[in-house]
Image: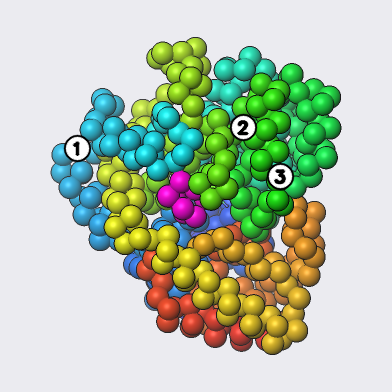
Amino acid sequence: MKTDLSQKLFAAAKKVIPGGVNSPVRAFRNVDGDPFFVRRAKGSRIEDVDGNKMIDYVGTWGPAILGHAPTSVIEAVHAAAKEGVSFGIPNPYEVEMANKVVDWVPSVEKVRMVNSGTEATMSAIRLARGFTGRDKVVKFDGCYHGHVDSLLVAAGSGALTHGEPDSAGIPNAFAAETIILPYNDAGKLEELFAKMGDQIAAVIVEAYPANAGLILPQPGFMQLMRDITKKHGALFIMDEVMTGFRVAKGGVQELEGLMPDLTAMGKVIGGGLPVGAFGGRADVMDFLAPDGPVYQAGTLSGNPLAMAAGLAQLRELDRQSGYQRLEELGARLEAGVRGILQEKGLGYKFNRVGSMYCLFFTEQEIINLDSVMTCEKEPFKKYFYSMLEQGVYVAPSPYETGFISMAHSNDDIDDTLEAMNVALGKI
Ligand SMILES: Cc1ncc(COP(=O)(O)O)c(C=O)c1O
Ligand SMILES: N[C@H](C=O)CCC(=O)O
């Protein structure tokens, strides 16, 4: 694989950008390598600056559910831009987007737009504290909710990859307000609420934890979160930044039949532009300024280009019955992977929900962060580079979830399986 131009760009980037990247997971540290720089992306493919073409399973870390640069989104952005790129004044797209979210996401009665998933969870937490008058927040180890100070404790994604689950720069006093529990441990959750339920403002959880691989809830665990928070006057916040509009129109809450008090959203809702949102019960959302005492704001929030892009993506998904097709593609990949693992006598675990999947390089049952951390790094590294050499880009970390898009064809999946067959054969 030619990498001359990428190497030059990376050397130049490192001089002026910390670590040469604008988000740590892009740095290839977990595979002891250097990133490539992308020139363009269309459909299921990306092309780097050296002309290497790859089938992409990162999908800009989730947003690209239709594939890269879908015509419907590009046209919507062009049309919106002709009328102005930002107003700082209410615009009609915001109302259409809010109605779409309220229509699609079961628990959301009112929604506010922000500019990233991090802003969405940060604002939801502040709102929960303002609404309940309590400070403590419960999160689960391995769950990543963006780089919010109080939530960057025992976090997944890049924080795991770089071996720094607790970031420097976070006051102890902030971290002390966050209580960490192991995922899927009903007993510990019950114990905690029995001891200090009246101090807890909220339980926040990734709807399906997908920043430490893809961990699935054991039967009853999510319902317990819902019931126990309600019983003790705390709020239940589902972080659907990754799963929202990805696993179903209404996200995991639709699949699981659960009604959280607040939901954080991002990624797919922005059609590839910087968008997040948080919403939920009207009585809670009405605590936000200007009606209520909880301040939250944003110069570019509800930006017309971002709203137009997101709306176009959601409309197109609906028009193409996207979730059905994504399930077919996911099932095709899963059947192939399971066949390869069996044929090679590898006991690796594979989890999938619709178009999200993770191949774990461990034989341990995946139930929480401890089990995820048994994944072996060296075999993953070999697998990653073999896939790359064969023209398939998977996330450069064993702890990230893979994403299939509507632009992936059956042939793309079959080619990917062939590459996997080779890559896993080298382990
Ligand atoms: C579940 C989850 N929550 C929150 C975030 C933060 O979103 P963003 O990177 O847009 O700030 C992410 C991804 O980064 C995520 O996967
Ligand atoms: N896993 C992260 C979010 O989902 C990856 C995105 C990032 O932090 O750059």
* Residue identifier under label 2: 236
Q: In the rendered view, does 20 fall on the left or right side of 398?
A: left
Q: Is residue 246 magenta?
A: yes
Judge whether 425 appears above or below 14 on screen: below
Q: Residues within 10 Å of mark 3 (few under 14, many from 20)?
A: some
Please name the amino acid that badge 3 sits on: Phe
Q: Secondary structure at mark 1?
A: loop
Task: Provide the residue span drawn in magenta.
Answer: 243-251
Mark 1 or mark 3: which comes first in sequence? 1
- Residue 333: horizontal and vertical position, in percent? 54, 74
Residue 91: image location, x then y, percent? 24, 30
Give the residue pinned by disc 3.
221
The location of residue 385, given as percent across then percent down, is 60, 76
Which residue is found at the position 53% from the left and 32% from the top? Answer: 262
Q: Residue at x 70, y 50 (%)?
A: 219
Q: Which residue is mark 1?
A: 84
* Earlier residue among tags 2 and 1: 1
Q: Secondary structure at mark 3?
A: helix
> For numbered disc 2, what is the local secondary structure?
strand
Q: Quadrant of residue 426?
A: bottom right
Residue 167 visible here: no
State the separation of the CA atoms marked 2 and 1.
Answer: 38 Å
